[in-house]
Image (spheres, rainbow, N blue to C red):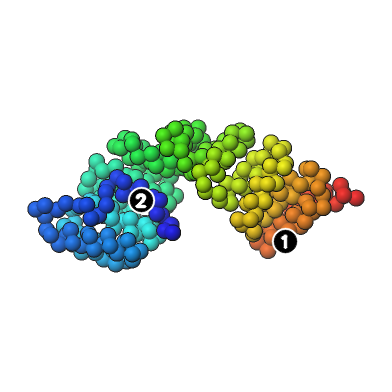
Amino acid sequence: MKKYSVILFIALLFIGLYPMLSFAGEDYMIREYIQQGYLYSQQNNHEKAIESFNKALKIDPNRGEIYLYRGMEKFDLGDIKGADNDFSASITINPHNAASYYLRGSSQAALGNYKNALDLYDRTIKLNPNVIDSYLRRGLVKMFLNDYVGAMKDFTNVINVSPNYESYFHRGEVRDMFQDYAGAVSDYSMALKCGEGDFRCYYNKGVSELKLKKYENSIKDFDKAIKLNKNSADAYYFRGLAKGSISNYKDALKDINYAKDLYKSNNDNDGYEKAVNFLNKLNSNNN
């Protein structure tokens, strides 16, 4: 799966698919190169797609949408700086195209320029308030900027219009930040109902259940998390905590020992030390 496929798919909702372009009265070769680039893109041959868009831009360097198309190919190749330059060029040519701001917001966020990304997503929403993914991306940027109240509002906006895994999951993260663990568990549960049962959701839900002292539920969540990622020292550690909390010291010792070994192999000294300390506590309780 493409690393940035979701972002690029949403962008196409703004600007339409390549073959649908109309070039009446324009150089026929521009359309040919764009269609050629589209076909290469569909084959995941992004280098060739970029070559085609380069040829189109050589004929007419003032078409903002071609910079967007080329930028998306660069984005997909991981050339974020190059993509950002293309998205910026598109904005300069056409400052009223919401897709340009959306995509540059994504590239600025990927570059760690979160304040710039926030401004770009604000402009995207002002130009086109109907593409709900813009609110999701803005919410994520707000989290990086520690604006958790603003992030909560954006994720809730998404949930009210078009609920999905990411909106519930990230709102759950915000609720964890506010120590609303029951609310976080509810959101993680809804995220899982959306059909994407990934490690982070089960892990986060397990931690929140643990903080609510719902130890059995927490253990079940960590069981599922570990099934998806057997190398997570933290998952074993917290499952060990949950098992120790219900006096299942034998299984707790196994989990904490395993976590200790994983922490050591990962050169995680803090993790290793906390596992050793808890092992000492368990051993004293078990004697």
Note whether 38 is above or below 286 in the view shown.
below
Could you tell me if residue 256 is visible in this image? Answer: yes
Question: Between 7 and 263, which is closer to the camera in this rendering?
Answer: 7
Q: Which residue is mark 2?
A: 9
Q: Is residue 164 above or below residue 88?
A: above
Amino acid type indicated by mark 1 = Asp
Please tell me in which quadrant of the rendered image residue 97 appears: top left
Number of numbered discs visible in the structure rendering: 2
Q: Can you identify the residue that label 1 sits on?
A: 261
Q: Residue most toward the right?
A: 287
Mark 2: give few (<14), some (14-19) or many (20+) Cα within 10 Å.
few
Left or right: where 25 falls relative to 61: left
Secondary structure under tag 1 reads helix
Residue 171 position within the rendered picture, expressed as x and y whole percent measured from the top left: 52, 38
281 with respect to 111 (left or right):
right
Identify which residue is drawn at 65% across, 54% down. 226
Q: Earlier in the sequence, mark 2 or mark 1?
A: 2
Residue in the picture at 37% in, 57% down? 75
Which picture quadrant has residue 127? Answer: top left
Who's the residue at 22% across and 52% down the image?
20
Front of the two marks 2 and 1: 2
Q: Residue 1, percent across and down?
A: 44, 59
